[in-house]
Image (cartoon, helix red, strand yellow):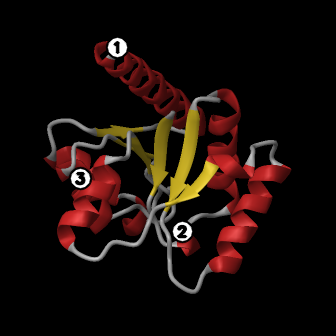
Amino acid sequence: GVAVCAVHEYFKIDHEIWKVWMELMITNRNATLVLASRPFKTLVRTRLRELARAAGVSPMRVRFLPRFSDRSSYAAILRGCDLQLDTPKFNAQTTAADLLWAGVPIVTLPSDRYVGRVGASLAMGHVSGVYIARDTQDYLRIAAALIAAAGRERERERERER
């Protein structure tokens, strides 16, 4: 399947963006939502899986990245992402730059606060890889198109391996 990553601190994930992500998971059954793994946050991970189930998404489709021990394993983990979903109120910053270096496209939805415009700022200084949505429907449309493209690429890879 397609690894749709949302590598953020948990406090950045609000109810509104979670609903958008769950809608994306419902309409894209080949996708798995991959979140950051934070130590000592097992209750949060359990709660996020419960929220997925309540939204109609199998908790098995919500995964958490493994912890990394060094910079090279971190880069390898990020390269396993097919797409990064940004959070509007607090955009990814250093992580977004790392994801772009790893070749992972990012979908962002800017807000009116500085911390909510970092993704768009990165897009202005980067030739490709950051997709700036106008609203949540545009965010869903862009993410769905990138998921479909990643799914097609995975299918081509499987065909080449046969």
Q: Is residue 4 above or below residue 142?
A: below
Amino acid type, residue under disc 2 in the picture = Lys
| Image disc number at residue 12 | 2
x 35%, y 47%: residue:
80
In which quadrant of the rendered image does the C terminus lie?
Answer: top left
Q: CA distance from mark 2 to mark 3?
A: 18 Å
Q: CA distance from mark 3 to mark 1?
A: 39 Å
21 to the left or right of 155: right
92 to the left or right of 56: left
Judged by depth in the image, the label closer to the viewer, 2 or 1, is 1
| Image disc number at residue 162 | 1
Asked which secondary structure carries label 2, the reply is helix
Q: Quadrant of residue 152?
A: top left
Counting from the top left corner in percent of width and height, residue 153 is at 35, 21
Mark toward the start of the polypeptide (3 vs 1): 3
Q: Quadrant of residue 40?
A: bottom right
What is the tally of numbered marks visible in this picture?
Answer: 3
Amino acid type, residue under disc 1 in the picture = Arg
Counting from the top left corner in percent of width and height, residue 154 is at 39, 24
Q: CA distance from mark 2 to mark 1?
A: 42 Å
- Mark 1 nearby-residue class (10 Å; few <14, some 14–19, many ≥20): few
Judged by depth in the image, the label closer to the viewer, 3 or 1, is 1
Asked which secondary structure carries label 3, the reply is helix
| Image disc number at residue 122 | 3
